[in-house]
Image (cartoon, rainbow, N blue to C red):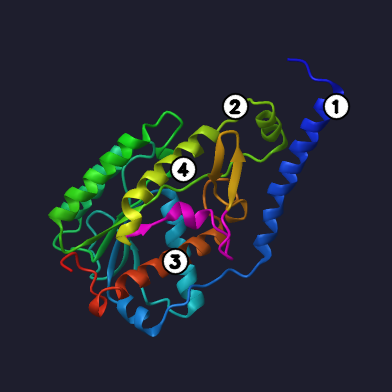
Amino acid sequence: MKYGRSSIAKVVLGAIFLLLGACGDDSMKQQTIPLPTLSPEQVKALSGKTFYFAHQSVGYNIVDGVEKVLARMGLPGLFTVKELKPGEPVPPAGLLHSAIGSNGDPGSKMMEFQAFLENRLGDSHPDMAMLKFCYVDIGKETDVAALADEYAGTMSRLQAEFPQTVFLYSTVPLRIFDSGFKASLKRLLGMEVWGDEANIKRNEYNEIIRKKYAVSGHLADVADWESRFPDGREYRIKLVGGEYAALIPAYTDDGKHLNAYGQQVVAGRLLTFLARLVTERPGGDVSGNN
């Protein structure tokens, strides 16, 4: 296909505008990081609860964010944050977390999540438990409908096995869409950009999870938290064929993990979610029996 000078100029200018628009988000890094507003009732209800969080690398980012946020709120003792290691005692309460399975193999994560609940936690049954996949668990070839079905089946079986625990569901984290000049130009020319299809698949998976679990009130929508500005605006990238959520550039330094700013934004939203969850039931009871 041949392009005249006028067409090429339009393509180049369009790419420049896309690039400049994406760079504008970096100014957010200079803003004050928002903190969640928890009522005394919510603080009291959260205190003493056990939240088991199974994850990989982005999960560590979120856990780090929780500690930073609680320190800034003057509530460093609200949650005892501890990574569970083999042979070590399990604290009676707090945010207990562990890295599970292998990245790129979501099936291994579901198996180890079950193993932790059945064996590694001993007689300790957490009030709440959540398995979060990583962005790398979904690629452009992933059958997201089949994965969502497998995830739903696993969570359903575990809820039946541990009725005293409330299982929380999670969307999968996102990556940024490459906003560089070369990538923008390739999109305008209808060429494939590495990473686009995988992020689109993550969006598709997350929509399935939202449709299934949002109504339950137990959906920790990590992808939404990563793609929503502090003022509530959604961050979307327009591509041929649709508009897709992406990790906000100001929340990351490498395009995939959360930086100190992003950690605290997402952690604050997680704490708000947990606080709402424990106070929506009488007496802050989040046992699966209610």
- Between circles 3 and 1, the one closer to the viewer is 1
> Is the residue under label 3 in contact with that under label 2 (CB below 8 Å)?
no
Depth order, front residue of 212/273: 212
The residue indicated by pointer 2 is 192
The span from disc 1 to disc 2 (Cα, nearest Å) is 23 Å
Q: Which mark is residue 45?
A: none
The residue indicated by pointer 3 is 66
Return the disc, 1 or 2, that comes first in the chain's sequence: 1
Q: Residue at x 36, y 52 (%)?
A: 170
The residue indicated by pointer 4 is 203
The span from disc 2 to disc 3 (Cα, nearest Å) is 37 Å
Q: Residue at x 20, y 54 (%)?
A: 117
**Residue 48 at least partly seen:** yes
**Residue 108 at least partly seen:** no
Q: Is residue 165 magenta?
A: no
Return the disc, 4 or 2, that comes first in the chain's sequence: 2
Q: Residue at x 72, y 43 (%)?
A: 19
The answer to whether residue 39 is above or below residue 114 is below
The span from disc 4 to disc 2 (Cα, nearest Å) is 18 Å
Q: Is residue 233 magenta?
A: yes
Q: Which portion, as a residue range, is magenta?
A: 218-234
The span from disc 1 to disc 4 (Cα, nearest Å) is 36 Å
Return the disc, 3 or 1, that comes first in the chain's sequence: 1
Q: Amino acid at mark 3?
A: Val
Left or right, 96 with reference to 63: left
The residue indicated by pointer 1 is 6
Look at the numbered disc 1 and give the secondary structure of its residue.
Answer: helix
Q: Quadrant of residue 92?
A: bottom left
Look at the numbered disc 3 and give the secondary structure of its residue.
Answer: helix
Look at the numbered disc 2 and give the secondary structure of its residue.
Answer: loop
Residue farthest along the top direction in this orientation:
1
